[in-house]
Image (cartoon, coloured by chain):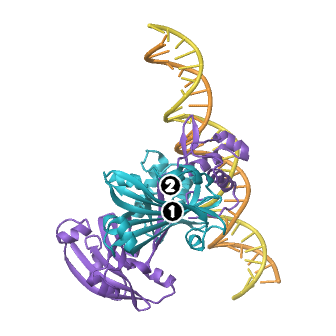
Chain colours: A cyan, B purple, C yellow, D orange
Amino acid sequence: MKTEKDGTLHNRILGDIEHRILSGEWPPGHRLPFEVDLAQQYGCSRMTANKVLTQLARAGMIERRKKSGSFVSQPVAQAAVLQIHDIEAEVRSLRQHYSYRLLARSRRVATEADRQRIEVEPETQLLDLVCLHEADGKPFCLEHRLINLTCVPEAADEDFSRSAAGPWLVSRVPWNAAEHRIEAVAANAELAKTLLIARQTACLVIHRRTWGADGPVTAVRLTYPGERHTLVARFEPGEAERT
Amino acid sequence: MKTEKDGTLHNRILGDIEHRILSGEWPPGHRLPFEVDLAQQYGCSRMTANKVLTQLARAGMIERRKKSGSFVSQPVAQAAVLQIHDIEAEVRSLRQHYSYRLLARSRRVATEADRQRIEVEPETQLLDLVCLHEADGKPFCLEHRLINLTCVPEAADEDFSRSAAGPWLVSRVPWNAAEHRIEAVAANAELAKTLLIARQTACLVIHRRTWGADGPVTAVRLTYPGERHTLVARFEPGEAERT
DNA sequence: AGAATTATCATGTATATACATTATAGGCAA
DNA sequence: TTGCCTATAATGTATATACATGATAATTCT
C-alpha cells in the first residue's frame, strides 16, 4: 500500500478532501461539491475530479448518487486490519531464537471430527500435523493443522520435520479466501503439559481456514499462552490508497 | 465495498485478470501483458486497461515497473479484516434481548495509571465509565472506558445511564485511527463476580484506542467470557473492489 | 388535480490524445 | 573496455470529448 503523497494533482485533491472529511469540516451526510465545481476549484478537468471521487467512494468515505451528488458516508461498522504474522517472523521480531518441533504426523481419510474442522468431501485424504513453535527453546505456540491432500498432493511427500507447513503452503498453493476465528480457552491438562504452563491458564486460540481454487486447502489451530501474547489490529479509516 | 460484477467492460477485464492470478494460471512473478496488448486482447483503449491495472496494483495483486511491465505480486504477509461490531447489534444478531447497565461513572484528572491506558497529556480531564452489556438479562460483556474530555467536552454532560458511550461517541466525534489489542486472560474474583462466571474462566479481552484530529479520544477495554464468544475475521485477497 | 411524458442534470463509463517519467538497450567516443 | 549519451519502450498523469444511465424536476395531457 502506497501512502506517500507524491505531489501529483490527483493526490493533492485526494488528500485535501480526505482532510476535510476526517477533520469533521465535512461531517457525515454533507454533500460535497459537484464534479464540475471541484474541477474548477482545483483547476483540473472533470475526469480528474471524477477519478478522485471514484477512489474515495471505493474507500467507503463517500457515497455517490446520480443527479443528487456525492455525500460523506456515515461511519460504518468498525473494521480493523489484523496482521497475521508468520510465526517464525513473529518470534524473530521479539529478538528470540526460533525453533520448531514436529510432534505428530499422520495421514488418513477424513473422519467426521476432521470434517468439523475442514469442510472437505467424505473420503478425502488428509494430512494431520501437530507441531510446536519455540522461542529461545521455550514453547511459544502449538499448531494443529489439517491439509487437504486433494488440493495439495505434494504435501504427502514432505515430512515437515525440519520446517513448518505454513510457509511451505503459502509459497506453493494459491489461495483466495481465509477465515479466522479467535477465542479464549483455559488450558486443559494436555495443553498445559505441552506448553509448560499451569492448568487453567487462559490461552488465545486462532483458528484459520484457507480456501483455494479447488476447495479447502488447510485448517490450522494456533494456541498461544494468553499472558504472553497479544494480537494487534489497526484501522486507519482515512487511508484511502494513493495512486 | 461493491463486489458485484456489473457487466461493464472494466469489471469484466478486472475479473478475468483476477481469476488468472487467483487460479495460479499467472503465478507470482509472472509478467502480465503490456497495457497496449491487453487493450487489443479485450478490444478496449489503453486508458481502460490502465485503469484496471492501476486498481489491481492498489489492491496489491500486481506490481508495476516502468519500461519492464506489470508483475503478479508475491503473496504478502497475511492480513485479515476483523469486524468490530457494535455490541448492541452483536447481541441482537444472536436474537437475544439487549440491555445495558452503568456500573460506575467518575470524572478526574488523568492519573499515571490512566495514562498507561490512554496517551493523554498530564492534567487532562477524563471521564471513566464502567458498564455492563447484557444479553437476555445475563452479562455479555464488561466495558471499561476512558474518555478524553479535552477532545469531547460534551461527554461531561451526558450521564450514559441509559445508553452506552460507544455509539454516542461514534456518531459525534470524527476519528481517524484506531488500535486494537486482543488477548486472553483468566477471570479474577471481581471479574468472575461481575460476569457471573467461574473464577479462572478464560476471557477474551479487546483493548481499543481511538484517535481523532485533536489526539486520543477514548480507550476502551471489552471483556467477554471466552467460551461464549469468538471473533471472526475474513480475508479475500482477490476481492479488489469494483468500480 | 393527477398521471404520464419529457427535459435536465449529475454521475458513470469509455475513447483518443498528449506529454511526463523512468528504466533499459544500444551506440559512440575516450 | 569503460563511461556517457541518446533513443526507445512502457507506464503515469491529465485533458477533452462523447454518450449512457438514472433520478429529479418540469411540462403536458386527460
Residue for badge 2: A165
Regarding mark 2 in the picture, which secondary structure is present there?
Answer: helix
Residue at 67 percent across and 67 percent down: it is A123
Horizontal and vertical percent position of residue B150: 25, 70
Mark 1 lies on residue? A145
Can you see residue A24? no
Judging from the image, mark 2 belongs to the subunit labelled A
* Front position in the image: B97 or A109: A109
**Mark 2 neighbour class, 10 Å CA radius: few under 14, some 14 to 19, many 20 or more:** many
Instruction: State the image coordinates of residue B175 (x, y, percent, origin top left).
Output: 37, 66
Residue A129: image location, x then y, percent: 50, 60
All told, the count of numbered labels is 2
| Residue A237 numbered tag | none
10 Å neighbourhood of mark 1: few (<14), some, or many (≥20)?
A: many
Q: Is residue C18 left or right of residue B159?
A: right
**Foreground of the two, B201 or B123:** B201
- Mark 1 belongs to which subunit? A
**Location of residue A199 with respect to B51 vertically, above or below:** below
Residue at figure coordinates x 64%, y 39% from the top left: B34
